[in-house]
Amino acid sequence: MAQVPNFSVVVPTEGRIALFALLLSSLRIAASLYSGLTEVIIVDSSDKDTANHIDTLCRKQDAIYLRGPRSVRAKRNLGISHAQYEIVLFIDSDCTAVPDLFIEHAACYQPGKQEPVGCVGLVHFQPSASFWSSVVKRTSYGAAFRLAQESKSPLWGPTANISYRASVLREV
């Protein structure tokens, strides 16, 4: 049986305490169902009170808490620099991980004809009347979230659920 990859999950955040708590709980469930190692790295730029809440949630869920800049791109780069495992999985703080998140991503990295650099995961939107939900549903922007379903080898994808080899990210 092939060895499963280990995952460093990087989550950029600012605020969203209730959604963030749901994400951390869902990541813990996904990790408990996965045979490989996982770590969760939170990079936060919230105000002081919110940051304290997020830090407390991280301690309760064994997540690594880092203070970071407001730029989401810079937060992801900071997370990459702290990642200890060979695959870095990005998920957004307003998402909820499905229980088989790590299993699905690990399947992308199994030895085969071609060593993949990354893996685009499915993103399902919950029914909502929010502005963002309506933008995704009513514009071509929503196509990005369907890439994992519509292409066997997408060249890019939304960072709401995507993973890459850490070595490639560090090289870039």
Image (cartoon, rainbow, N blue to C red):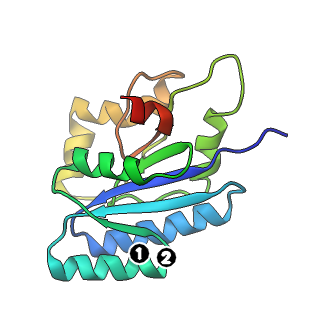
Residue 53 occupies quadrant: bottom left
* Amino acid tagged 1: Cys
Q: Residue at x 22, y 38 (%)?
A: 138
Q: Residue at x 68, y 57 (%)?
A: 34
Asked whether, in this view, residue 80 is left or right of residue 5, the answer is: left
Give coordinates of residue 90: x percent, y percent.
41, 48
| Foreground pick, 29 / 143 | 29
Question: Is residue 165 visible to the viewer in this orientation of the structure?
Answer: no
Say few, some or many: other residues with alpha carbon within 10 Å of mark 1 (under 14 / 14 to 19 / 20 or more). many
Asked whether, in this view, residue 97 is left or right of residue 115, the answer is: left
What's the CA distance linking mark 1 and mark 2?
Answer: 5 Å
Q: Residue at x 27, y 41 (%)?
A: 137
Q: Are marks 1 and 2 in contact (CB under 8 Å)?
A: yes
Give coordinates of residue 104: x percent, y percent.
61, 44
The N terminus, quarter of image: top right
Q: Is residue 130 above or below residue 168?
A: below
- Circle 2 is placed at which residue position? 61
Asked whether, in this view, residue 119 is left or right of residue 157, the answer is: right
Say few, some or many: other residues with alpha carbon within 10 Å of mark 2 (under 14 / 14 to 19 / 20 or more). some
Element type where label 2 sits in the image: loop
Q: Residue at x 33, y 69 (%)?
A: 19
Question: Is residue 92 visible to the viewer in this orientation of the structure?
Answer: yes
* Amino acid tagged 2: Gln
Give coordinates of residue 31: x percent, y percent.
61, 62
- Circle 1 is placed at which residue position? 58
